[in-house]
Amino acid sequence: MFKALFLLLALQANPNVVWKSEIKNTDGVNSIVLTGELRSGIDHVSGTVDITPCGGTACYTPEYYEFDHYISGAGQSLAIPQIPVLSAGQGTLGTSGAAAAPASGQSVSQQPSESASQQQDGGDGEPLWQLVIEAILWGFAMLLTPCVFPMVPMTISFFMKGSESPARGRFKASMYGLFIVLLYTVPICVIIGLTWLLGGSGVTADIFNWLSTHWLPNIIFFLIFMVFAASFFGAFEITLPSKWTNSADKNSDRKGLGGIFFLALTLVLVSFSCTGPIVGSVLVKSTQGEFWAPMVTMLAFSVAFALPFTVFAFFPSLLKKLPKSGGWLNSVKVVLGFIELALGLKFLSTADQTYHWGLLDREVYLAIWIVIFTLLGLYLLGKIRFRHDDPVEYVSVKRLFFSIACFSFVLYLVPGLWGAPLKALSGYLPPIETQDFVLGNASGQVSAVPAASLQDAAASEGATLTIAHGLKAYDNLDDALEAASRSGKRVFVDITGHGCVNCREMEQRVWSDPRVLESLRDDFVIAALYVDDKTKLPESEWVLNDSGKPLKDIGRVNSYIALKRFGVNSQPNYFILDSDGGILKGPRAYDLDVEGYLEFLSE
């Protein structure tokens, strides 16, 4: 059965067919089927399907399927009979993985190892709790923008003075806050709900998975962040049509809850030039996770934004302690613009790493961040002024402290230009392997142990990959086992991916420990199996799956090996083998416990 999974289907097939996919349940067994409408004169359909099952925080190994069907009676336009693509009758999909690459609608019996079902998620998505905290912080930050901050005391005073009693005023303010939450959250829920109802959970999940993994949306998100940053810097204002604002403002004069609702709607519309970029930022980041993450994060964001309107109504004396409006509000917008500029680079980096463009290597990424936060520090000191800024006659204590924080962060980043690991940012920066120059030793790697390039010649001879910390690795298991036989060492199998964030975090925060790195260098022959590598193999190196179909690229071969031989299909996962290929230990998944990892590596 499919348990808490969504599926990303990439279909390459005849363009003369209108294709659909769905999950069907027959006698308690789920299967994926393709249906569609055939255009006139077409009697043959064929193609390939790439399926990526995801669940929780993990996206599992992609699976590859082919189909080739002739349709009888195709003289006129007609519906295609259902083409089965994947059957989950064996119960593998949704526990530890998918059946390994059957073709033409046939499923393969597969029983993963018991240990594989106990593995931890190794997904790339940002944890939901982290997204929620970020959304709350953005919600509070939005209150400090010049479009919103002056509205707080005005709105509270309106409710308190225009009500028959303080209790009535508090009720109105509470409803005002509730309507703000609904206005931000309900539209997102409706959009996601409609995609769910019209296309099913698979379509909804496909949309969000595509948004988080494909190069096109990542480039669009990057450009959106740049536009938002320019807006905060004062280049232009992002506004909604004035007709909407005027209509909402007129209806706010109504009595009762209707008037309060339109008053809240007026705030949402009027403040859009300040809040729009922030709302967009929250939504864009949340689409990198589960399909319901935007609903949760927008709820957290809107509650944080609306909360002060209710709190100040219950404790009006706090209004006297609020700072007066002034030029500092525009300074908040500019600071947020710098932050948007820095965060937007992550989306360009994601596309760059996934497709190996080589545009945004680690040192380039760091150089841009160093410039951004240096400029931010100078801005806080009044050395840089933007269009709507007031002159800074003197530096306040708050500005001084914030500028100190900025310059301290810049100094923390600078050593990264020469290869310092910067572990606190390992999830945001490109992998250190993309860095052209790393200061430290002959291999160009920074390490507290001798250079990884000094690995045993018998263990590393013929190794084709240089992975984290300069370690030499084989790109296939057979060569690694042959090297292990020559050297008498054990084989360390690293099931990984180029786009796997948690894999990079393990390498920077666990492998970087001198004891771990020394053990990997001295005690093992390493096989790094990248399951998302699209490099095509020569025909002599193709591997046939269980149904006799060839797997033609490195990633699909490694995915097949990971599932059939090791019973896992998420990354990262680690195994230790003897020189004959027998599994001694594993799997060990994403876990930042260094001592536990050392125990795993021990004899």
Image (tube, helix red, strand yellow):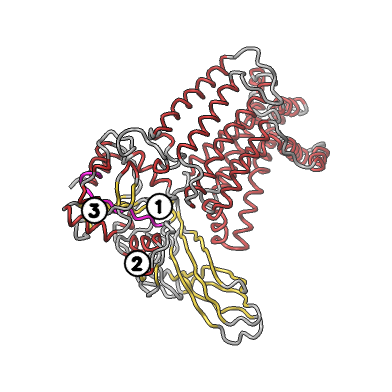
Q: Which mark is residue 491?
A: 3
Q: Which mark is residue 541?
A: 2
Identify the residue at the far front of this view.
Answer: 442
Residue 191 is one of the magenta-drawn residues: no
568 with respect to 417 (left or right): left
Q: CA distance from mark 2 to mark 1?
A: 20 Å
At label 2, counting other C-alpha atoms closer than 10 Å, the crowd grade (few under 14, some 14-19, many 20 or more) is: some
Viewer-side label of 3, 2: 2
User: Which amino acid, by three-letter code, is at mark 2?
Assistant: Glu
Q: Position of residue 465 (x, y in %)?
A: 33, 51
The residue under the point 55% across, 35% down is 342
User: Which amino acid, by three-letter code, is at mark 1?
Assistant: Gly
Mostly what secondary structure, the magenta segment? strand
The residue to which callout 1 is attached is 497
User: Which amino acid, by three-letter code, is at mark 3?
Assistant: Val
Q: Position of residue 286 (x, y in %)?
A: 55, 45
Q: Quadrant of residue 177?
A: top right
201 with respect to 264 (left or right): left
Q: Which residues are magenta?
A: 521-531
Which one is earlier in the sequence, the residue at label 3 or at label 1?
A: 3
Which one is earlier in the sequence, the residue at label 2 or at label 1?
A: 1
The residue under the point 59% across, 36% down is 340
At label 3, counting other C-alpha atoms closer than 10 Å, the crowd grade (few under 14, some 14-19, many 20 or more) is: many
